Amino acid sequence: MAVQPEVEKKSILRAVTDAADDVFTRITAGIPAAEVRRMLRGEAPGRPNPRLKPHSEAFLLHIKPTYYHESVTKFTHTFRLGLISTYLFFLETITGLILMIWYAPTPERAYTDMIRLLSNVPFGQLMRDLHRLGAELMVVAVTLHMVRTYLTGSYKAPRQFTWFTGVILLVLTLFLSFSGYLLPWDQLAYWAVTIGTSMAEAVPPKVVGETINLLARGAPDIGANGLMRFYLLHVLFLPLVLFLFFFVHYYKVVHFGISLPSDEEEVGQDTANKVPADRRVYFLPDVFIDESALLIFITALIVAATALFFTAPLESIANPQSTPLHTVAPWYFYWLQGLLKIADKSIAGVYIPGILLVLLMGIPYLDRNPSRRGRDRRVAIISGVVAGIVIIILSWMGTPYYAVQGAPAVEIVQELMPEEGMGPVREMGYAHLPIGVYDTRTNLESGDAEFDEVLHEFSVAIEEFGKTDKSFNEPYGIVTVSQEQPQLKRITWDIFWLSPDGKEETYKRIFFVHENALYWEQYGLKDFSYVRPPQPAEGK
Amino acid sequence: MKRPWYRFLYVRSPLAKIGLAMLALLGSIALLLVMGILETPRMEAQTLNFEGRSIQNGAAAFANNCASCHGVDGKGLTGVAPALHSKYFFTQRLKDLEYTGSLHDYVKLTVAAGRPSMKKSQWAQMMPTWGQRYGGPFRDDQVEDVTQFVLNWEEDALVQTAETDPWQPFQNAPTVDIFAGGGAVEAAPTPVATGPRPPQELFVAMACVGCHNIDQPQTDSNKGPIGPNMANLYETAGTRVAGQDGKTYIHTSIINPTALVVAGYNPVMPADFATKMSEEEINSLVDWILDPNRQR
């Protein structure tokens, strides 16, 4: 554009503001500044609507509908769970990419990379915690999204295929979360994934199951090959597949429109795409502002929750030789672990989940009832609620509280000083372990109030088990705390009891506690103790 | 239309929505700034934490694998393995060896690769290979943990005096007496006995424990690697040599170890026990070894 004739025609000021408006319009993909001002004031658009232009000009907006039915924009209709799931996927991609900078998927490096990330990378712990929390929230959001769709009957014609892709996205989300579980290469990761992949082994016939297991683990046991496979699944394959199915899913959502509240249309009809002009809510600016404000708000919530409350667990380095007591799957697979406790491996691990998955995908075709109204679908809603309750009960059965109880002595020590994680003794820490020998029959005074409480707990637990367990007679315990090295104490738990035939039995467990040791429950801002100046170590 | 109870949550004005979002954004930026200030102490605490955790893990590995030769407190066992919890070890050992690397590297290498074949050594056993890289059982991180644990004795060791330093000089290496201004010292001082010592103590102090396992039975499928296991010795001792009861057999084996070496073992047991223990002590040790209900 020639500048001179432009300036001659208008005044210079006018020419500059016009040019600025031109640039602004390019950035907003077609909306001039004056129109943005009218949007912010809440004024109605003129005719023809100048706010539709970005939908045809901007790539990111061309997939969004230009307007929605007023009834579906209410927060409580969809809770925007699909949007939230998508957002969490992008949050995971960004934090995951950042984490990849400091990570190498080999058994020699993976765990030390975690330590380096936590102790040498500014905001490294925040990134890790965000990624972990985001992953768990994504599982929650996707599941709730499915529950909402089920309860409003939105899977019915014509949206059967949308539901089908949704189920695939749910499965992909679970697999994504699960495949990321192994990457820190700690005990929690290693054994949860060992349990998970061993289920694949139960696929009949035997040769198929073993082959699947071998393909997933890369060797009979998880090792360098298994880690590399899970890493590639996690960072490349599963995200790509999920990305593909996300767009299929979202295209179907836009194509059919979000189903209206069931009371607003006749049974059997689908009027989501026939929105009367007076009930249209345009994406720009109303829905756009709602969605962005919601996402910013959620981001702030997640950042605050991560900074102040949430810590991603990190146990000690993976050790194929030692299975920690009470190994558990990730919480969203507790129900499967619960099933495995009561049924055979191939039934609980393969047939039931397989049938469930097929049932879930087939729901739109099995449910021939055309009505989406709650009072017309009592059977569907009640069976859904029952299924939910069953899953919750099975999940509870999957936790260590159900049906796995070790020997009394093992459980008593595990309660006070678990093999992994913190426990009450490590929570008190080095300073509250007075050196001495404490016998539950005689000496329960250590001079330290907090340690006395632990001793009391110890003796009460021994007494309780002594009363209830017939193979655990006349038990007593001895706790020995000694100085092993500067800043390092040794704590020995000895439990003695008589077996039913009067033989003396013992159980011994030795732990070491270093003055500076923290456990993952204590990382980050949850415990401000590290902000204090270091106190002079005692016992030197 | 019915108005729900939570209608106070509704925000209608677009400007108010944008304002609230901006507030949330500012809030999280402020939180991140506060975190940024606390990141340095957090990372320092984490660095110390993982050093401490490494020492903890090393302590457990040492107790399970190293303490039987180097002693529970790292002060070594006479004739079995040298002390590590020793002022000499921390101050002079590398100089005597003319080793120019750091003590950390020295310990780590020795743990990982072992100390293969020492000719003319006074030690009953050579240092085995521990690192997986050299065919042992420890992963790299475990080798590092044990090294960290051994080096953590430094503070305690440096205040040792000539009397408390448990170092036993190597017979085949030149050494310097760090407590007496640099003169050479005699190897392996003989401990002075003060009255009969209990057999439990003797079994450790005489370093029997380094080669003989008294908790494991000696069977065809479960043989002690250096010396025979002793858990079932009270049954088998009387059957080894025709016409000799168990007591005589054990007694002879202690004072003259090369006389009755069990087939399949090398004659590596030290022959000087008669000079280190009184007759009374040897007899109590024999009784204790042969006692099926022995007390540790």
Image (cartoon, rainbow, N blue to C red):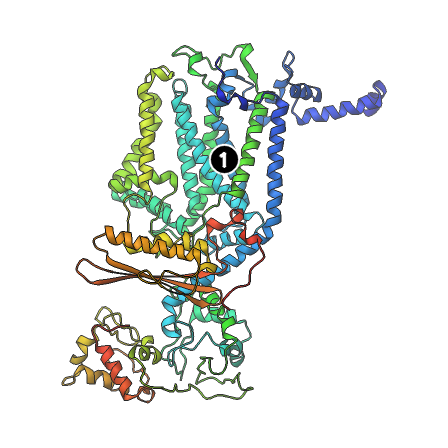
Residue A319 screen position, x and y as percent: 38, 56
Q: Is residue A323 left or right of residue B102?
A: left
Residue appearing at x 46%, y 35% in the figure? A138
Pointer 1 chain:
A
Identify the residue at horizontal 47%, vertical 46% (top origin): A312
Q: Nearer the viewer, residue B181 or A468?
A: A468
Residue where numbered disc 1 is placed: A89
Q: In this view of the protein, can residue A1 be seen by the observer?
A: no
Residue at 38% across / 87% down in the picture? B192
The residue most toward the right is A8
Q: Amino acid at mark 1?
A: Phe
Instruction: Please name whichever residue, B19 or A192, is drawn nearer the observer in this view of the structure.
Output: B19
The spot of residue B8 in percent (x, y) is: 54, 22
Q: Which part of the image, by quadrant, shows the N terminus of chain A?
A: top right
x then y, percent, for residue A68: 53, 18
Quadrant in the picture for residue B114: bottom left
**Taking B155 as reference, is A501 left or right?**
left
Q: Position of residue B89 (x, y in %)?
A: 49, 77
Determine crowd level at label 1: few under 14, some 14-19, many 20+ residues with C-alpha closer than 10 A: some
A451 over B216 or under it: above or below: above
Residue A529 or residue A143, whichever sits in front: A529
Q: Secondary structure at mark 1?
A: helix
